[in-house]
Structure formats: structure tokens, C-alpha cells
Amino acid sequence: MNHPARWLTPALPRLIALGASLLLSGCITVDVGGGGQGDMRETVIQGKSGPKILLLDIDGEITDSDASGVLGWVLSEGTVARVQDELTLAERKGDIEAILLRIDSPGGSPTASDSVYRLLKEFKKKYNTPIYAQYLSVAASGGYYLSMAADQIVASPTTITGSIGVVMFGVSFSGLMEKVGIANQTITSGPFKDAGSWLKPMDPAEREQLQSVVDDLYDRFLTVVEAGRPNLKPARVRELADGRIYSAPQAKKNGLVDKIGYLEETIESIRTHLGAEQIRVVNYSRSRNPPANIYARTSINAPIEIEPEIAARVLPKPGFYYLWWPASP
């Protein structure tokens, strides 16, 4: 007879690590639905007949890689990979008449935001499929960026949007290090290799070089907004794109969105546009528990939300972001 401890012993270090994470952070996200594993399945979440409308979620931070946990589980699938899989399935099925982006995101990485934007634009062009965007609580920065692929943008009455711009987070602990007797001994191959390091103050040359990268990414953002909002002149886009957020009425007044309304109203607008008496809203998901209605979370995971470590909240990983920081996790 096998003793229970025989199989438990090899896993003990990981279990201890998991327990420590839970104690230190209070919470972690565990995907109980299998993460990014398994094939996507179609679920009809509204309607019984008529053309199919794909409800495609852009939920949370926009990423280009999976997030893994302490036991190696996939906590959340990267946004780009998931959108690619959903569009591939839509292409294979060949019966999607329109796409409805349901956006509730503060943004994310420039590359991930731009990749999703490109995937949507290519699908729309290839199949002449209209795309609608419905903003929920937040559609800011990268969340706004990728919505420029849509033919019509509808903000909920209480949506926060805008935050058009780029941010690189930085902090210097050099003064504190001096007080406690810690010295920076970083060795680099060139003067800009550790530009932005929190181990030393940033000198003017480093700031100028990093600012040039921010400016290039910002120019790309402006170009995408100008293409997606042809009713706005480039000079006006630049005026609006100073990083500030907008309420739904402010966004509508400034031409950043087309309408203010609810998800049900947008679905009705799609039905009218298609000239159909009825439509079916479908979702593609890997979850074992598919969404029950159009407001249910439709991303691939059904996670238990657990707060990340305090350090991760204060110090995001290095990089440039299309992100509204106050709304980020």
C-alpha cells in the first residue's frame, strides 16, 4: 500500500511556494478552467436564429504573452494569441457576419495593442466584416488604440476612455541606497545600456534618448487614431492626445467615440445594419463554463482573483506602455 507522503514529497517545495505567495500577497489568480489549454468552442449566448455576431472580449491588460503562476499553470492567455485563435476559428467557420468588441481594458504593451489592431483590420478587409466596439468601464490607452479598427465605437454612459499616449515608468532609489550604504556596481557595454535604471539618477542624455523612443511610439499612436477617426484633423487629434482621460460625454463631444449607449443597443444597431429580423450573438471560449449572457465575462479563463505582490504593483516590469496606470492591476 502506497503511503500518501510518497507522492506529496516531490511536490512539497512548490506547495510551500504557493502557500507563501498566498500569505504574502493575500491573493493570486488561478485559472480553474485550464488556462490556454484546449480547443475553443462556440456558445450561443443570445438569440436563436439569424446571422451570427462574434462577441470578442478585450478584457484587462493587453498582453502578448501568457501569464504563469508558481506551479507553472497558465493564469491568463496572452491577448494577441487569444484574439488570433478566435479570428482563426471565425475564418474556419465562415459564418460570422459582424464582430462586436467588448472592451474593458486600461491598455497594455504597444506591441500587443498594435498586433490586435492589425489582426482585426486584416480580418475586416479580407471578409468585409463590420466591426463594432462597445466600451464598458474602461477603454483607455491601448484599449482605445485597438478599437480604431472598429467601424463604430459606442461608449457606455459611465465609460472612462482616452489616455492617448505612452508612458515609461521609472523611479530612482539611489538616494536611499546611499543612506543605507548600498553602492551601484553595474557594468555596462555602453553609456545607455542601463538608462532608466532605478539604481542611479537619470542624466539628461539618458532622458533625451528614452524620450525619443516614447515620441516614436506616440507618433504611431497618433497615426492609428487619425486613421480610425477620420472626422478629426491631425492637429485636433494631437490636442486631444495629451494623456488625459475622458468621460463618455466628453469623448462623444470631442469625436473620440461615435455614440453613447448600452451593449444591448449596440447589438440592436448591428441587427438593423445587417437587415436581419433576428441575430445570434456567439462567443468562442475554452472555458468549461461558457458565459450565460452578453454581460458575463467571456474571456478564456474563469479565474479566482488573487492580488499580486505589493512589489509587482509598485514596480511594473521595464518597458514602454500604452496604459492608463491608475486603472492597472
Image: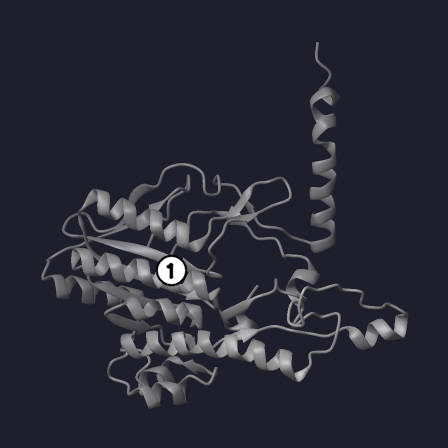
Give above or below for 139 relative to 79. below
Q: Position of residue 95 (x, y in %)?
A: 17, 48
x and y percentages locating residue 313 in the rendered image: 64, 64
Q: Nearer the viewer, residue 51 or 39?
A: 39
Q: Write the residue at 39% across / 64% down.
A: 114
User: In x, y percent, where is residue 190?
Assistant: 66, 68
Q: Quadrant of residue 260?
A: bottom left
In which quarter of the view is residue 41 placed?
top left
Q: Is residue 44 visible?
A: no
Quickly name the residue at label 1. 115
Q: Amino acid at mark 1?
A: Ser
Tell me: 142 left or right of 119: right
Extreme residue toward the front, this view? 189
- Seen at 24% across and 56% down, the residue is 123
Residue drawn at (49%, 61%), measured in percent from left and top? Answer: 61
Taking the spot 14% from the left edge, 66% from the top edge, the residue there is 273
Q: x, y percentage for residue 281?
A: 25, 53
208 w.r.t. 12: above or below: below
